[in-house]
Image (tube, helix red, strand yellow):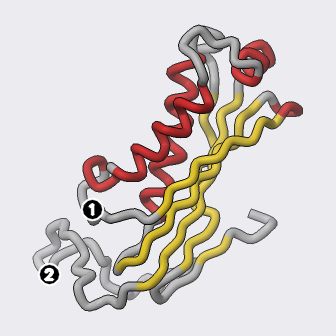
Amino acid sequence: MPTDPTAPLSHLASDGSASMVDVSDKAATVRRALAEGRIVMRPEAFVAVRDAQIAKGDVLGVARVAGVMAAKRTAELIPLCHPLMLSDVQVRFELEEATHSLRCEAEVRLVGTTGVEMEALTAVSVALLTVYDMAKSADKGMRIEGIRLLAKEGGKSRYQVSATT
């Protein structure tokens, strides 16, 4: 999504200080964001997570709930984010056997005046951190990578990652 380098920065007040964006004049629309990330681990750790053999319990179930909770609390973590009444948060995991990794995808929706990209990205981040926390006894060298926005809809702009990125 190209940006205009001459456009004023939305989070800066006229005096240059950080400021929350005023969205009171924006129309409420259905807004959606989709984000992804993955955690790569040793084969033994992957099998332990896949087969629910981690001592702390159901890694994916707990990580899913952590991701949902994180999306709902994004404004408490990211200073200039608006507190939002989310309509839906879905956190999904895909086991990638060939790479011994877990792909996490978070989809967030609401009807409102601002987007939910930060909520989707926060959900993925915290879900993957929860996997790390629960499975670190099996592999302290796990690697979280590739956290990114895949799509956003609603409001004025639309964003979709191309197949080549």
Question: In this view of the protein, which residue sits in the foreground, 129 or 140?
Answer: 129
Q: Quadrant of the C terminus?
A: bottom right
Q: Which dot marks residue 14?
A: 2
Image height check: is 73 above or below 55? below
Which residue does the image show at 31% across and 77% down from the upper left?
A: 9
Label 1 element class: loop
Label 2 element class: loop
Question: In this view of the protein, which residue sits in the foreground, 20 or 75?
Answer: 75
Which residue does the image show at 69% across and 69% down from the upper left?
A: 161
**Residue labelled with disc 1:** 83
Q: Is there any visible trace of residue 96 in the rendered image?
A: yes
Image height check: is 104 above or below 50? below
Which residue does the image show at 53% across and 71% down from the upper left?
A: 32
**First of labels 1, 2 by sequence position:** 2
* Local crowd size for mark 2, using a 10 Å CA cut-off: few (<14), some (14–19), many (≥20): few
Query: Residue 113 sits in which quadrant?
Result: bottom left
Q: Amino acid at mark 2?
A: Ser
